[in-house]
Image (spheres, grey):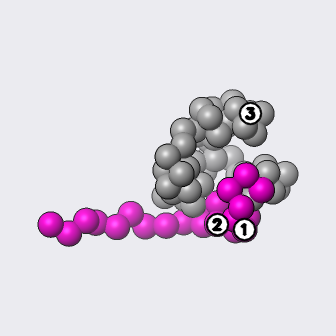
Amino acid sequence: MIGLEYIVRLYNGTYKKLAEKLGITPSTVTDWLSKRRPIPKAKLEALSKLFHLETEYFQKSYRKLKRSS
């Protein structure tokens, strides 16, 4: 999972709402998440301002942690 996916989930957002805020289509967000297309620099900066986080967090890969019983 890349940081963008984690951050959107953390903020209880949706990809549709994120796409609207960025002025793009939800399929563009899906392409970023699947790594079919990189997140453009301008959109990384917009994400940074929107979430108040450094741009590097949005493309960083994170492993899914297993929950212990």
Q: Amino acid at mark 2?
A: Tyr
**Residues at discs 1 and 2 in contact (Cβ within 8 Å):** yes
In the figure, residue 29 lies in which quadrant? top right
Q: Amino acid at mark 3?
A: Ile
Can residue 67 be seen at all in this image of the molecule? yes
Image: 22 above or below 42: above
Of labels 3 and 1, earlier in sequence is 3
Q: CA distance from mark 3 to mark 1?
A: 21 Å
- The range drawn in magenta is 49-69
In the figure, residue 53 lies in which quadrant? bottom right
- Which of discs 3 and 1 lies nearer the camera? The answer is 1
- Along the line of sight, which residue is nearer the eye, 5 or 10? 10
**Residues at discs 2 and 3 in contact (Cβ within 8 Å):** no
Q: CA distance from mark 2 to mark 3?
A: 20 Å
Would you say the magenta stretch is mainly helix, strand or loop? loop
In magenta stretch: residue 66 = yes
Residue that label 3 marks: 24
Residue that label 1 marks: 54
Q: Could you tell me which secondary element the residue under label 3 belongs to?
A: loop
Residue occupying image coordinates x 20% and y 69%: 68
Image coordinates for residue 46, horizontal then vertical, percent: 79, 51
Residue that label 2 marks: 57
Of labels 2 and 3, earlier in sequence is 3
Image: 68 above or below 41: below
